[in-house]
Image (cartoon, grey):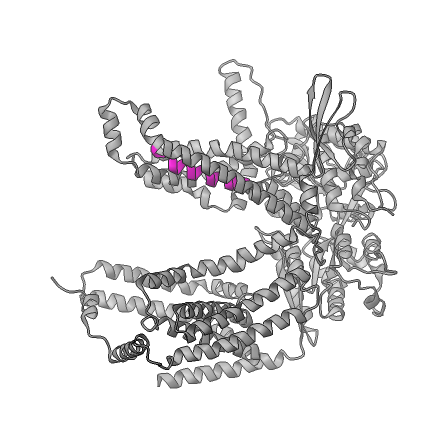
Amino acid sequence: MKRSFVIILLVALAVTSIIPLVSAQDEVELRWRTRPDNQAEIDVYTSTSETIDAAWDGVTLKYEPGGSETASYQDVLVTEIEAGTAPDVFWIPGTDIARFAKAGLILNLADIAAADAEFNAEDFYAGPMGFLQTPIEGQDTALWGLPRDVSAFAIYYNADLFDEAGLDYPGMGDSWTWDDLSAAAEGVSELGGEIKGFAMNGWWANWGYWVNSAGSSFFNEDYTGCGLGNENTVAGLEAANNLFANGWAIPWGNDGEGPFLAGSVGMYVSGRWSTPGIIANADFNWNAAPLPEGPAGPSNWLFWGAYAVNAKTEHPEEAWQLITRLTSAEVQGEIASLGANIPSRQTEAAIDLFLGTLPDSGVNNQAFVDGAAVGVTEAPLFNGDWPAIDQTYGTEINKVFNGEITPQDFADNICGMVEQYFEAG
Amino acid sequence: MELSGRGIQLLRPPSAKRVHERIIMTTLVDKRTTGARAALPPVVLVNIIWNIFIVLGSLLLFSTVFQQSEDFFDLGRPVQVFAGLIALVPAALAVYSSIQLIQRKAGGRFSAMGMNYVIMVLAGFYLLHLWGVFIGMDNISSAILANYQWSLGLAVAYALYWLAGRLEEDTPMRMRLEQAAIGIGMISLILLLWFSNILGAASAILSTYGNAATWITTGVIIISGVLAYRMLKLGIYFNETPAQQSAWQGWLMLSPNIIGFMLFFAGPLLLSFYLSFTNDTVGNIPEFIGLQNYGEILSLQITTTSLETTAQAALAPNYTALGDITLGSSRIVIGARDPLFWQSLRNTIVFCLLLVPLSVIPAIILAMILNSKLPAMKFYRAVYFLPSVAAVVGTALIWRWLYDPTIGYINYIISQIVGFLNNTLGMSVTDPAILWLTDQGVVLFSIVLLAAWQVIGFNTVLFLAGLQGIPNTLYEAAYVDGANKWQEFRNVTLPMLAPTTLFVIITTVITGLQVFNEPYALISARPLPTAATTSVFYLYNRGFFRFEFGYASSVAWILFAIIFAITLVQFRFSRAKAYED
């Protein structure tokens, strides 16, 4: 009896095992990965993957959310690329496109895209597409991927603190310039105690805004050298440093989000990605405003990341199909509905969709769209070693904001320090 | 006295099968010792035949390695040659084993046992891979976690069984409770597996048997496993001595660790050593460049110049000034080709110099307190040990919050104390408002504090064990001699703790030299401030951000040499001192 039961069980298992074996024949399996910011995004990406999979004959998709508390997205991806086990399609930040392309880690999709009648590069924001279509040595044309979404900075402000200080909300007065921001930061700081008027986090884009808005730039025009050795850099850094030196800002290098959420900061500069967290955690009245105008006019960053195809994929055609589907208007609409990022398709419909997100929070979505419109595109450096340059820029900027050197010292010496990291020509 | 069940079993006569085996073995051994030409036991013959297959498999593997292109999975020709040689090792071992077995030597048995055992384990791993267990691990854990409610039955079963154990033996109630516990446990397990889709998993595993590799691997596991076991039983035939038996038993016990070490530690270690002599970057085939990386990392230039000349101007073009010393009218300038390596090394050494006293001295004091007979000491022992077992990433985030200059508790408490001093005592103390994570002069100390807080608990446990090993008679003798508490501590406790202290200092220094998690998780700013960059963080940065795995490997090996040298010196010096004391 017992033996019969075991035999029946084994036969049943064997029969059921044949079903997936048969159905798996001729199926192309594509693994893809992107870096979600939270569980809600994981759920949307998972559902998106399942929807595309269901509508796509002959291809099975496997979505892998990347990164965890103990292993960063980037580290895991680099390790898998080195080991030859990376997914067919993966997302990487805009600044990484160049070094991945130069190292031969991602596929040049130009030829495949040229054969795709439905693809039109002009549907997407021009800045990221310009970089994604930059050929490297020995190539005439290139397409390194398609942008997943874009984002921009805004100033999140604590409306309660502004009310208490009797100040206009940022951007709501007659003008919104650096002087107005300094005055607001000072006014909020005067509330006393642990209250500070301003906060920004300690990475390149935060100080970069100040130099860009003063009319300077990280790089020269053709991105072959340093662009910071000028008086505009000094003006931008002095304006930012003024906030730290007067004690109106959270000291440089410290995380601004925690104190902002604790209700101790009047204005906090961050990207659209912070909005869901602030909605969930802030127990005070808040909203978002555009970044103030600098001497060179309004400025911001256009942050972006792209879906790229693993250079070692066995299915390049299908991988291209996947990234076009992942960046389609419908899928971008689903992702945008979470309110975390702006669709990378610069069409009126996509922007309207984004502007209609998170209506209950009352957040000023227009500030982000306006920011993206004037944003300096996050640049992958095809003629230099960005990590080394970032390290050098960052180390010297820390010295400026910690009072070890002056903005003038920085502008005088920085280009000489990074010269070695740019490639000739 | 009543004999236990186990004792009765020991007194039972051996089974007929066992007697039969012994007779065969004894006959074989007798024939062998009397010089008569006897046939080899069948299992030995089968093993020799199996060895032929191992040789063939090994040669096939060797040829497969060389059929790959020269880039060999982007690792290059040298790794391909090395892998080819490794592929031949089983063949060499199989030939050696066969010759020894034919000659009826113990070496043949041991090599056959070992080889079959290792083949079984490695093939087992490969089979799990073919079954998709490794990449399906997430699905398995998710499925079980999604149905966790059924595991509550296991807890109930355990509770019932525990309760039954409290009752008198052989009572009906105890038996019923035990049966109920087993029943609930079994049902819970079946339900847990059923709802976790055990049938689906089994079906997925069976579906892999459409692949010939799965069948072959399964066959290899069965054959090598059976042969390893049967060879193990041939001890009498090969005149196994008790020492030999102890030896293979010892190796067997160590084998999980040895196999794991070889696969996951020694292999990557060797590869990293090779890569340190190459220009390896992600996605490219490494090219051998000799000692170039080491030269770049270690190159220093020491030169003298006048006070009017800047330090940087005195150095060759590829060198960056690390520091300078003014001597009268001249200046000695030290420059490096890779200044960040030297700065990170300096940070690491300073980190260790601070970490050792901050984690050892409080640990001794805590251990003394916890060794006393005060109430609730067991509770406090657990409390102080908690930071050592808590995840660094989690604790670092809490510390980041504590260190926050605006809303952090540390600055808040300092402000309160300053306020108290100024307002109540009329002093005029300035609130330091310390920038724990951004001030270049403080940030390393902030990291040390976190690390010391984590290490203290572990060190305390070690000192506690050391204290409990000190004979009480020594304290009694000291008391009789009129020693006070301090003299007892100075002349009895400290000398007797010397070996423990040596161990604690060495492990703390090694931990300190490898510090990575604390700066990585504690400081959000990127790039990390130079003053907080430690050697391991630096090598991580070179590898993962700049893709220079060859260079990063060289940094790792230099760091290894430094740790090894420091530990060796410390060990020699401290051991001599410990025993002298």
Q: Is residue B507 magenta?
A: yes
Q: Is residue A361 visible in this depiction of the protein? A: no
User: What is the total number of numbered labels drawn onto the structure image?
Assistant: 0
Q: Is residue A211 visible in this depiction of the protein? A: yes
**Considering only vertical position in the picture, is B490 above or below B574?**
above
Measured as percent of width and height from the top left, residue A77 is found at 65, 57
On the image, which quarter does residue A53 sit in? Answer: bottom right
Q: Which residues are magenta?
A: B496-513
Q: Residue at x 71, y 51 (%)?
A: B289
On the image, which quarter does residue A267 sit in? Answer: top right
Q: Is residue B27 left or right of residue B548?
A: left
Q: Residue at x 31, y 38 (%)?
A: B468
In this view, the residue farthest toward the top is B426
On the image, which quarter does residue B325 sit in? Answer: top right
* Image quadrant occupied by the N terminus of chain A: bottom left
Q: Residue at x 39, y 78 (%)?
A: B43
| B40 vs B230, nearest the viewer | B40
Q: Is residue B457 left or right of residue B411?
A: left
Measured as percent of width and height from the top left, residue A4 is found at 39, 86
| B375 vs B6, nearest the viewer | B6
**Considering only vertical position in the picture, is A175 above or below B229?**
above
Q: Main secondary structure of the magenta part?
A: helix
Q: Is residue A125 magenta?
A: no
In this view, the residue farthest toward the left is B1
**Considering only vertical position in the picture, is A12 above or below A383?**
below
Measured as percent of width and height from the top left, residue A200 is found at 69, 38
| B343 vs B557, nearest the viewer | B557
| B361 vs B21, nearest the viewer | B21
